[in-house]
Image (cartoon, rainbow, N blue to C red):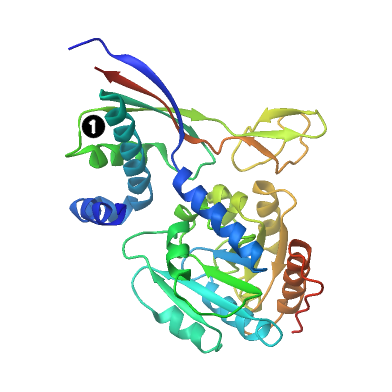
């Protein structure tokens, strides 16, 4: 089903695909998702709000440039992707609370220094809202 | 045209993948298959490590491997030497495996009952991190020739993995590999991660890892007793 449409869009944007396929496929999922929602409610999407965790494995700038490619030729063409980045938070068993990381290279409590692998935020990759017109 | 309004939705972009991955995981568990995926940069020694793992584990276990590759079936051919069932997933230009590809590859593949399934991801330290494949254990491999700061450059994938394997340890002295720094860097981005030092070529360290693998499987399945003899 989606595979053929996917293949078509991929080949259409093959130049971008070589460098950013991962973000391109994510962008296409976002567009498909928004389009489906818009179709059901009979509205036009002008912007998509996305929460993007810093530990999601998706790069913001790359996703933004892929978004325009993914929108091309769809009802979402010309719409905007608005990204809210979510910092990584770990749970510190010493301080008994979640704490934002001070660096992605150091998974430890910024206050007491205790290492923690318990990630409580920062893996988000979710569409939270659509800006629409009737 | 009317004024724009905000429509609240809450949708996980990777939901489709996650749903497929969950179904795969349930299915593997119900069949008693312990699934291990491998990620690394290209050339870190995934295929060699996997070949050694297949050859060794298949003496006492039923094993199979899925291998993701961009274009060639070279890896699958190499792995076939282990005489374990191997199936190739050619991803074309796609830089990672997704759960649906694993599901599709399993369809119509008569491996017989399995104890272990190994999934070799495409050589890439960025893209595979976001995609759950239904595995029980994700290995991140890093060779001693790569530089000790790899984990700091790619914290996301190291953080997403369960176990780190330092490969080509037989070359450590020749390339003046700073083991302590490498281990500290892995621990910095994934505190508490279990690390194994191996040489698939000489066999060094393989036994220890395979023992660990066997223990993890025994824990996760209701199988009475699973033993991997090297």
Q: Nearer the viewer, residue B93 or B217?
A: B217
Task: Name the residue located 20 percent from the left edge and 37 percent from the top edge.
Answer: A74
Task: Name the residue located 48 percent from the left edge and 85 percent from the top edge.
Answer: B78
What kind of element bears circle 1? loop
Q: Position of residue B58 (x, y in %)?
A: 65, 84
Q: Position of residue B224 (x, y in %)?
A: 81, 72
Task: Name the residue located 30 percent from the left edge and 54 percent from the top edge.
Answer: A1
Relative to B212, is A14 on the left or the right? left
Image quarter of residue A102: top right
Please say if A109 is above or below B96.
above
* Residue B130 visible: no
Image quarter of residue B56: bottom right
Residue designated by label 1 = A76
What is the quadrant of the C terminus of chain A in the image? top left
Please say if B183 is above or below A56.
below
Q: Position of residue A79 (x, y in %)?
A: 25, 27
Q: Nearer the viewer, residue B184 or B2?
A: B2
């Amino acid at each position: 089903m989606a595979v053929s449409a996917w293949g078509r869009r991929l080949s259409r944007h093959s130049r971008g695909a070589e460098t950013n396929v991962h973000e391109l496929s994510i962008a296409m999922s976002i567009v498909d998702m928004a389009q489906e929602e818009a179709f059901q409610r009979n509205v036009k999407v002008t912007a998509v709000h996305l929460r993007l965790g810093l530990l999601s494995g998706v790069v913001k700038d790359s996703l933004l440039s892929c978004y325009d490619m993914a929108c091309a030729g769809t009802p979402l063409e010309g719409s905007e992707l608005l990204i809210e980045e979510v910092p990584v938070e770990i749970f510190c068993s010493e301080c008994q609370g979640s704490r934002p990381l001070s660096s992605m290279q150091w998974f430890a409590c910024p206050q007491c220094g205790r290492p923690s692998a318990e990630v409580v935020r920062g893996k988000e990759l979710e569409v939270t809202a659509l800006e629409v017109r009737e | 045209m009317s004024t724009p309004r905000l429509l609240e939705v809450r949708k996980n972009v990777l939901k489709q993948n996650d749903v497929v991955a969950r179904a795969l995981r349930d299915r593997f568990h119900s069949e008693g298959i312990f699934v291990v995926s491998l990620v690394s940069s290209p050339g870190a020694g995934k295929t060699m490590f996997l070949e050694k793992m297949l050859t060794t584990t298949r003496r006492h276990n039923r094993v199979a491997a899925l291998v993701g590759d961009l274009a060639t079936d070279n890896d699958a051919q190499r792995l076939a030497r282990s005489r374990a069932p191997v199936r190739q997933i050619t991803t074309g230009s796609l830089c990672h495996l997704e759960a649906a590809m694993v599901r599709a590859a399993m369809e119509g593949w008569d491996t017989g009952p399995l104890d272990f399934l190994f999934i070799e991801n495409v050589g890439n330290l960025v893209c595979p991190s976001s995609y759950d494949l239904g595995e029980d254990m994700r290995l991140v491999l890093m060779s001693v020739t790569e530089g000790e700061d790899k984990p700091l450059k790619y914290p996301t994938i190291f953080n997403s993995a369960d176990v780190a394997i330092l490969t080509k340890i037989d070359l450590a002295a020749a390339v003046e590999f700073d083991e302590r720094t490498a281990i500290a860097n892995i621990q910095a981005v994934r505190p508490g991660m279990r690390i194994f030092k191996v040489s698939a070529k000489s066999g060094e360290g393989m036994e220890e890892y395979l023992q660990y693998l066997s223990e993890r499987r025994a824990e996760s399945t209701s199988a009475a007793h699973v033993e991997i003899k090297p």
